[in-house]
Amino acid sequence: MEGLFDGLVATFTFTIALSFIPASIITFSVKERENHVKHMHLVSGVSLLSYWISNFFMDFIKSLIPAIIGIIMM
């Protein structure tokens, strides 16, 4: 019974920790829209494809690092 309780606490803690990743990505997107970062990049000559690919890879890395740490902790 004690092992079940420890497992539930660990699962709850892990779930709460992983929920902060999308929150940080959303916060960055809101600030980006507020400051018109995409427009500044496009005016500076950055192509739309490279802008979105770089954003995708940064979001992927932000998610990958905690996921790897979580797997190692398990």
Image (tube, rainbow, N blue to C red):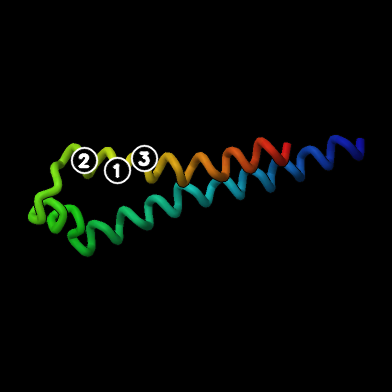
Which residue is depicted at the point 88% across and 36% down? 3
Which quarter of the figure has residue 1? top right
Q: CA distance from mark 1 to mark 3?
A: 5 Å
Question: Circles 1 and 2: CB distance less than 8 Å?
Answer: yes
Which residue is depicted at the point 37% across and 51% down? 26
Q: Quadrant of the C terminus?
A: top right
Q: Dot 1 surroundings within 10 Å: few (below 14), some, or many (20 or more)?
A: few
Q: CA distance from mark 3 to mark 2?
A: 10 Å
Question: Mark 2 highlights which residue?
Answer: 50
Mark 2: amino acid? Ser
- Regarding mark 2 in the picture, which secondary structure is present there? helix
Q: Dot 2 surroundings within 10 Å: few (below 14), some, or many (20 or more)?
A: few
Which quarter of the figure has residue 15? top right
- Regarding mark 1 in the picture, which secondary structure is present there? helix
Which residue is depicted at the point 38% across and 57% down? 27
Residue reaching furthest to the right: 1
Q: Dot 3 surroundings within 10 Å: few (below 14), some, or many (20 or more)?
A: few
Question: Circles 1 and 3: CB distance less than 8 Å?
Answer: yes
Mark 1: amino acid? Ser
In x, y percent, where is residue 5?
Answer: 84, 41
In x, y percent, where is residue 45?
Answer: 9, 50
Q: Nearer the viewer, residue 42 or 10?
A: 42
Quick one: label 3 or label 2, which is nearer the N terminus? 2
Compared across the picture, whether 25 is left or right of 47 comes to: right
Question: Circles 3 and 2: CB distance less than 8 Å?
Answer: no
Question: Mark 3 highlights which residue?
Answer: 57
Q: Is residue 8 above or below residue 28?
A: above
Question: Mark 1 highlights which residue?
Answer: 54
